[in-house]
Amino acid sequence: MRILTQTAQIPITDLQQWQPMVDGAPHWLDIADPQRDVLTTLGLHSLVIEDIMHGGQRTKVEHYDGYLFFVFYAFAIESGVTLRMITTPLYVCVSANAIFSFHHGALDLIDVAWRRWQSARQATVLHQGTLLHGVLDTVVDSYFPLIDEIGDGVEELESRILAGASPAQLRNVLQLKRTLIEFRRHVAPTREALNALLRGDLLALDSATNMQIQDVYDHVLRIIDGIDLHRDLLAAVLDVHLSVQSNRLNQVMKVLTIASIILMANSLIAGIYGMNFAVMPELGWRWGYPVAIGGMVLLSGLLFWFFRRRGWLRADDM
């Protein structure tokens, strides 16, 4: 546990050291890997404690007696070509005189938000709304690099599939599509939570803080638009792959059909002279065999020239 102020980070081992608003400025208590007894000591509602301990909650904001409870998610992308999403829930309680944040494991976004809060120390009015905006803005801004990384992955997969898709690449496309679905599942409710906050029903914000939250809301809309765009691009990549595969199959069938026609023409000549009728003038002819072979070669060449002239055997289609 640690207390974050605008001047220092103070590690604490006992909650008795937590004295919010002792100097008239907002204090921030950050707790990593919270335990049930600690949450109970802080006086949190039993439903809030269950949400923090069990996890798996959707992004939301709820009003309890004396404070607001936020659930947001931080994201990271696994290194490699699979682009799997790693989600870390962040729980924030905002009251009139204190802010609590809870998370399981280390979370770099907390330090980033604290440094932003430090940079705002010259502000004329500092209250819990200013700190809340710093936390929310830091979390939402961390989504933009993920969108850029996903966009690069989509472009790379698109170029590979156009060059010739393998089963592994198709699996990567489906994995990336699942990543985008999971990303949107957590981000989309953020819009609803911020909208409820902007309406002023949950927390009284001054005009300046309200404008800051509105800016965060606009960033969320941009993130959702980016997710939807990449999902559409992935769907287009799969459609292009299916079209390319269908076109290649058509080309193969066309070549096989042409080869069958040529062989059928040769089979016609061979079949005529293989009927073994007693009266066939060519059967006793000395040049019958060479002429039959030559006729097959000539007919095959004429058919090949005809199909090539019609554009059915272009080199780029083979």
Image: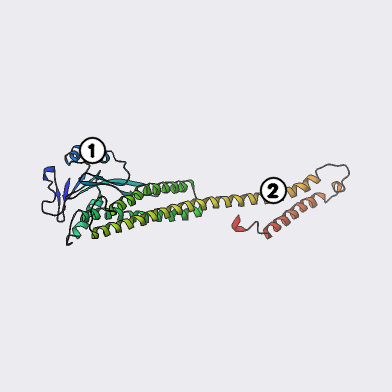
Residue 248: percent from the left, percent from the top?
58, 51
Residue at 59% across, 58% down: 316
Can you identify the residue that label 2 sits on?
A: 260
- Residue 102 lies, with reference to residue 136, above or below; the image says above
Q: Quadrant of residue 277?
A: top right
Residue 125: percent from the left, percent from the top?
17, 59
Q: Residues within 10 Å of mark 2 (few under 14, many from 20)?
A: few
Q: Quick check: can you spot residue 15? A: yes
Quarter of the image with the C terminus in it: bottom right
62 left or right of 240 in image? left
Residue at 28% across, 52% down: 197
Cα separation, mark 1 vs mark 2, equals: 77 Å
Query: How is the protein colored in the picture?
Result: rainbow
- Residue 217 lies, with reference to residue 53, above or below; the image says below
> In front: 63, or 83?
63
200 left or right of 79 in image? left
Q: Quadrant of residue 140?
A: bottom left
Q: Are marks 1 and 2 in contact (CB under 8 Å)?
A: no
- Residue kind at label 1, given as amino acid type: Ser
Residue 136: percent from the left, percent from the top?
27, 53
What is the number of the mark on residue 28? Answer: none
Residue 28: percent from the left, percent from the top?
18, 50
Q: Secondary structure at mark 2?
A: helix
Q: Nearer the viewer, mark 1 or mark 2?
A: 1
Q: Quick check: can you spot residue 112? A: no
In the displayed image of the protein, which residue is found farthest to the front?
201
- Residue kind at label 2, given as amino acid type: Ser
181 left or right of 14 in image? right
Q: Earlier in the sequence, mark 1 or mark 2?
A: 1
Can you identify the residue that label 1 sits on?
A: 46
Residue at 71% across, 50% down: 261
> In front: 125, or 182?
125
